[in-house]
Image (cartoon, rainbow, N blue to C red):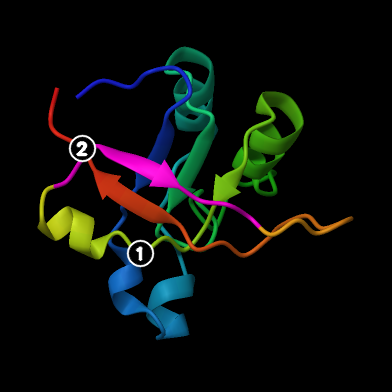
């Protein structure tokens, strides 16, 4: 598959399998680093990056940084992050391309919003 400008990229780390066990789910979370975020936004043209962990990025972060992917995505790329996606059924069915629907609640002054995303499988190209 290929990534096109404006795509929503959803990353399955496998971490959601441990939900709701906070010790297994939330500690030392796998995820992407700043280089991957820059590639996805700047080169691949992703408009949103989501993941099945609670931060999208690897946690703990590199020493001397504090959530650099969040800082980059919001302040530089202007792209939202979606955290804690349930991607297990899509992975089990080997569905890699979907039409993504996700409307956040309109909340004045908020830094985030709950949403109920939907992934409608597409035919392979």
Q: What residue is rendered at 82% in x and 58% in y?
A: 110
Q: What residue is rendered at 45% in x and 57% in y?
A: 117
Q: What residue is rendered at 27% in x and 61% in y?
A: 14
Q: Name, please, the residue furthest toward the bottom.
A: 21
Query: Marks 1 and 2, how far apart in space?
Result: 18 Å
Q: Quadrant of residue 18?
A: bottom left
Helix, strand or loop for the magenta stretch, by majority: loop
Q: Is residue 125 above or below residue 122?
A: above
Q: Nearer the viewer, residue 104 or 90?
A: 104
Q: Is residue 98 magenta?
A: yes
- Residue 4: percent from left, percent from top: 37, 18
Instruction: State the SS at label 2.
Output: loop
Q: Locate the C terminus by quadrant.
A: top left
Q: Which residues are magenta?
A: 95-104
Q: Which residue is mark 1?
A: 86
- Residue 53: percent from left, percent from top: 44, 61
In the image, taking residue 17 as reference, residue 53 lies left or right, namely: right
Q: Which residue is mark 2?
A: 122
């Amino acid at each position: 598959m290929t990534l096109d400008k404006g795509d929503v990229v959803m990353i399955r780390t496998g971490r959601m399998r441990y939900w709701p066990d906070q010790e297994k789910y939330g500690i030392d979370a796998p995820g992407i680093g700043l280089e991957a975020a820059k590639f996805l936004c700047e080169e691949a043209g992703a408009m949103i990056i989501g993941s099945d962990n609670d931060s999208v990025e690897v946690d703990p972060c590199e020493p001397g940084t504090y959530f650099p992917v969040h800082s980059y995505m919001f302040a530089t790329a202007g792209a939202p992050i979606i955290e804690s996606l349930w991607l297990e059924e899509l992975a089990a069915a080997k569905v890699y391309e979907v039409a993504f629907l996700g409307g956040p609640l309109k909340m004045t002054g908020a830094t985030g919003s709950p949403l109920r995303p939907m992934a409608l499988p597409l035919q392979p190209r």
